[in-house]
Image (spheres, grey):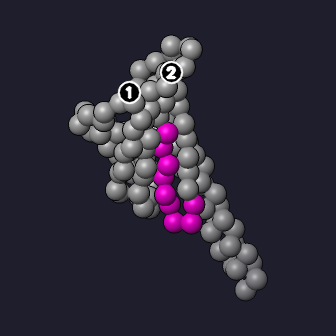
Amino acid sequence: MHLRINSRHLEVTPAMRTHLEVRLERIRKHFDHVIDASAFLMVDKAKEKDLRQTAELTLHLKGKELFAQAHHEDLYHAMDAVIDKLDRQLLKHKEIIQDHHHDKNKVQSLSQ
């Protein structure tokens, strides 16, 4: 999976890239048909200090895109939260795909 990282008001360090890549491995374990991922990390000048760091992540799948966004006072926690959100979305997407194919096979076997 190819990971593309963009940022606003901060410099992406090798530690940030490594952290995202390691966390994305969990997603790859659940679903290995991810084409690529796009991350957008930013620091906003929000009035609430605890919501300044933002992480957005988009996963490109065959025929679908999954998007999640998380805010936190620490960028690493925001990255973890966005990965958790996408992991839940991906598991739900995987169940829908598997249920769809399962129902199709069931209908074919009943018609024979």
The residue under the point 44% across, 41% down is: 40
Mark 1 lies on a secondary structure that is: helix
Task: Locate residue 12, reporting x and y percent.
Answer: 30, 35
- Check disc 1: other Cα within 10 Å, few if <14, some if 14-19, many if 20+: some
What secondary structure characterizes most of the magenta part? strand
Q: Quadrant of residue 76?
A: top left
Q: Quadrant of residue 19?
A: top left
The residue under the point 51% across, 66% down is: 62
* 13 sits to left or right of 112: left
Task: Locate residue 48, reporting x and y percent.
Answer: 56, 14
Disc 1/disc 2 C-alpha distance (Å): 18 Å
Does any portion of residue 72 appear in the rendered image? no
Pointer 1: what residue?
76
* 55 sits to left or right of 92: left
Pointer 2: what residue?
45
Going by the numbered disc 2, the residue's amino acid type is Lys
Closest to the camera, between mark 1 and mark 2, is 2
Q: Which residue occupies the foreground of this view, 106 or 3? A: 3
Does any portion of residue 5 appear in the rendered image? yes
What quarter of the picture does the C terminus occupy?
bottom right
Report if residue 63 lies within the magenta region.
Answer: yes
- Is mark 1 in CB contact (under 8 Å) with mark 2? no
Q: Which residues are magenta?
A: 56-64
The residue under the point 48% across, 43% down is: 57
